Image (cartoon, grey):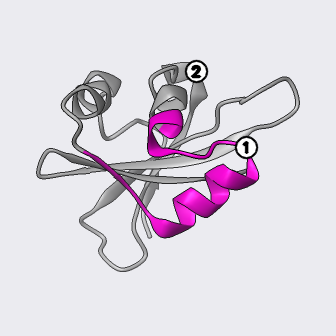
Amino acid sequence: MTEKKIAHYHLDNVFACIEADNVRATNSAYDGADDLGIETLDAMCAVIKKLTIKDFYKSMTTHNDRTIWQDVYRPFIDEQTQAYIKLTITNGLLIVSFKEK
C-alpha cells in the first residue's frame, strides 16, 4: 500500500458525483455510519458535502490494487465524534467507506 499527503481526487469532483447521484457505499460503510447515527446514503453524502481540505488526512492505495487510490478524510460529526471516510472515484462513480475513527 502506498500513501501520500496530497488528495488524489479534487473535492469538486467528489461533490459533482454526489450532485449527479453517482454514489455508492460499501456494506461496511452503512454499518459504520449507522454506529455514528447516520442511517442513510443521503445522510452520509450530507457529511461528505461539508468536507474541506482541512479534513483531509491522507491518500492511499487499496490493499488489493495499488492503482486505485482512496482519499481519507477525518471530519468531526459533532464536538466529540470524528469519522473516518474513504473516498474513491472510479469511472465517474464515487465509492464511499464510512466509520468512526
Badge number at residue 54: 2
Q: As drawn, which residue projects farthest toward the right? A: 80
Residue range of the region highlighted in magenta in the rendering:
23-44
Left or right: 89, with 48 as reference point: left
Give whichever of 76, 58 is nearer the camera: 76
Quadrant (top left/top right/bottom left/bottom right) for the N terminus: bottom left
Residue 99 visible: no
Question: Could you tell which of marks 2 and 1 lies nearer the N-terminus?
Answer: 1
Q: As drawn, which residue projects farthest toward the bottom? A: 64
In this rendering, the answer to whether 77 lies above or below 69 is above
> Would you call the spot at circle 2 few (<14 residues within 10 Å), some (14-19), or many (20 or more)?
few
Q: Label 1 near label 2: C-beta < 8 Å?
A: no
Residue lying at 72% horizontally and 29% vertically, measured from the top left: 76
Residue on which disc 1 sits: 37
Residue lying at 55% horizontally and 58% vertically, measured from the top left: 30
Q: Position of residue 86 (x, y in %)?
A: 48, 50
Q: Position of residue 66 (x, y in %)?
A: 30, 70
Classify mark 2: helix, strand or loop. Answer: helix
